[in-house]
Image (tube, grey):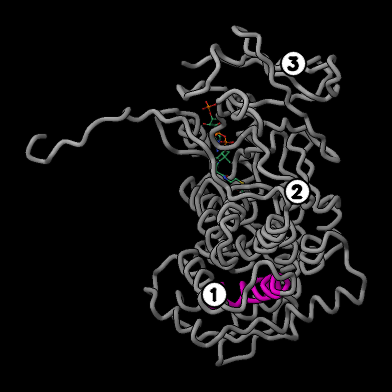
């Protein structure tokens, strides 16, 4: 039986939406269906609490509405099953807060993104990726001394165990780099299994430094494998982004000097991708980590989740899409395809679960693009012009307006990576390098959360009821 729920709040009250509630045929379920949420105002209940009432029996359950420092309240539904025998239903967790967090805040309506309270625009303008890493991991901006020490620690852990490097030879030359990176990062749990005690804060720090330092080296090794060039060892005298460019593009036969403009542009992209609260890959890292697994394995799970085109794989998909569209005169045809429910084509780089106004990261990248291209002394890219025209066209279209679909960060990030010489198949790997710090920060928060439990959602079972096994010759 399925009944709808309604949320009854005053117009000015903060909205708390819970997905539809389903009733299970479980023992102990009370008659009727809980149906109405209302703000409690009486019976010694907190003004913030809600009451879930079964309209048939009149039974009530009080649910605490908890407030964060900013943002919508959350309704604590942990008691619902115990008191009503009913689970909540929220596919895709669109209305469910899975944890408490102090790391990143997004206001999708306002297009606001903050790391530890600092707006991403300010960090993009004034900070560096390595400083943002410190901020995300430790909660505060570092002092000069702390920054130098942290930077030095990361710089001096960039080398890979030579055995790990040999793993790349097991991959075909045309293996997708994300598959190689996920595999090799997963293998770090074999290299560092006995030395990683997740309950030891010092070990958690070592894990954080190690994975941050080695991600660019692993990514570059994957790239060198695909192009058949010898691996370029990391240089500890270079900044995080400059070292990555060196490992990508240096060859033994000639000197390679990192272009500081390219390094700066990459640093900016890394800042913008560093964290994004409980997104698909971060939630995956938290979920895998909640079982107490080796943290390198949890990061490998996050990399796998990031790869999908609905998430980090979108930057690669956007470039492929722009190339497929090819010219401005074909835009209307592809927008029509994106709107056609019978056509699986979607406008890649458009839409976001949280941002329904604009993605601040997309705005920053779009703004930075011309500056970067000018500094690099490059002509404007036709691809960028096509992207701008596509954006302009889609933003005037009723379908995109009505569904609040705006360009997200990945609509533009690939175009800059392309300008820096990064091949399309490596775009999502770039995202993974930047997001690693976010994954680690969330994993660390999850491990010490006193409310933390193994992640284990419930389900609405629609399969067959109990039946007897039939021998194969009787079927
Ligand atoms: N093109 C065409 N239609 C779209 C698009 C799109 N890019 N995105 C969403 N829609 C439509 C859906 O068909 C749906 O229509 P309906 O209500 O008629 O069924 C409606 O808009 C809502 O979309 P959902 O898929 O339900 O929204 P959700 O929040 O689940 O998904 C997502 C968000 C995955 C980002 C989606 O917009 C999408 O697939 N975008 C393209 C891929 C992309 O750019 N991903 C990168 C996201 S940013 C990041 O991960 C870094």
Q: Which mark is first along the chain, 1 or 2?
A: 2
Secondary structure mainly formed by the magenta segment = helix
Q: Quadrant of residue 415?
A: bottom right
Residue 57 on image: x %, y %: 61, 8
Which residue is identified by label 2?
101
* Rendered position, 282 above or below 180: above
Q: Is residue 51 left or right of residue 287?
A: right
Find numbered disc 2 in the image and state the secondary structure of the residue it sits on.
Answer: loop
Q: Quadrant of residue 47?
A: top right
Residue 466 on image: x %, y %: 30, 30
Residue nearest the observer in this picture, 456 or 183: 456
Which residue is identified by label 3?
38
Badge 1 density bin: few <14, some 14–19, many ≥20, Cα 10 Å: many
* Rendered position, 406 above or below 224: above
Residue nearest the observer in this picture, 6 or 146: 6
Q: Quadrant of residue 391?
A: top right
Ligand 1 found in image quarter: top right
What's the magenta region? 203-221
Q: Is residue 274 left or right of residue 383?
A: right
Check whether the beta carbons of the residues at disc 3 and disc 2 lie within 8 A of each other.
no
Residue 314 on image: x %, y %: 55, 50
């Amino acid at each position: 039986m399925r009944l709808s729920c309604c949320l009854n709040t005053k117009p000015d009250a903060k909205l708390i939406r819970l997905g539809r509630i389903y009733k299970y045929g479980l023992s102990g379920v009370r008659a009727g269906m809980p149906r109405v949420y209302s703000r409690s105002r009486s019976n010694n209940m907190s003004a913030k609490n809600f009451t879930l009432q079964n309209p048939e029996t009149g039974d009530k359950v009080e649910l605490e509405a908890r407030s964060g420092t900013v943002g919508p309240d959350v309704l604590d539904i942990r008691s619902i099953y115990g008191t009503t025998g009913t689970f909540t239903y929220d596919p895709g967790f669109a209305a469910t807060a899975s944890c408490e967090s102090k790391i990143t805040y997004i206001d999708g309506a306002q297009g606001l993104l903050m790391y530890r309270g600092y707006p991403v625009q300010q960090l993009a303008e004034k900070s560096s990726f390595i400083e943002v890493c410190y901020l995300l991991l430790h909660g505060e901006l570092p002092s000069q001394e702390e920054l130098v020490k942290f930077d030095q620690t990361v710089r001096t852990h960039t080398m890979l165990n030579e055995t790990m490097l040999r793993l790349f030879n097991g991959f075909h030359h045309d293996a997708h780099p994300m598959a190689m990176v996920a595999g090799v990062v997963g293998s770090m749990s074999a290299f560092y299994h006995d030395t990683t005690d997740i309950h030891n804060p010092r070990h958690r720090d070592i894990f954080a430094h190690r994975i941050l330092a080695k991600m660019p080296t692993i990514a570059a090794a994957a790239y060198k494998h695909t192009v058949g060039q010898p691996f370029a060892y990391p240089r500890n005298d270079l900044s995080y982004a400059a070292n990555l460019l060196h490992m990508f593009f240096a060859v033994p036969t000639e000197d390679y000097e990192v272009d500081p403009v390219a390094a700066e542009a990459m640093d900016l992209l890394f800042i913008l991708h560093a964290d994004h609260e409980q997104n698909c890959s971060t939630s995956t890292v938290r979920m895998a980590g909640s079982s107490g697994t080796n943290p390198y394995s949890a990061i490998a799970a996050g990399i796998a989740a990031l790869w999908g085109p609905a998430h980090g794989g979108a930057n690669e998909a956007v470039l492929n899409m722009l190339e497929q569209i090819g010219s401005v005169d074909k835009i209307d045809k592809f927008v029509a395809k994106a709107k056609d429910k019978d056509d699986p084509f979607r406008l890649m780089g458009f839409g976001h679960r949280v941002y329904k106004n604009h993605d601040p990261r997309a705005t920053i990248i779009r703004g930075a693009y011309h500056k970067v291209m000018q500094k690099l002394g490059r002509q404007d890219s036709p691809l960028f012009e096509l992207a701008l025209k596509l954006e302009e066209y889609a933003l005037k279209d009723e379908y995109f307006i009505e569904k609040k679909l705006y360009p997200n960060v990945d609509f533009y990030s690939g175009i800059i990576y392309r300008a820096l010489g990064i091949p399309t198949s490596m775009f999502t790997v770039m995202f993974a390098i930047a997001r690693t710090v976010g994954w680690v920060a969330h994993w660390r928060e999850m491990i010490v959360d006193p409310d933390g439990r193994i992640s284990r959602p419930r389900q609405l079972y629609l399969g067959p009821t109990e039946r007897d096994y039939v021998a194969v010759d009787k079927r």
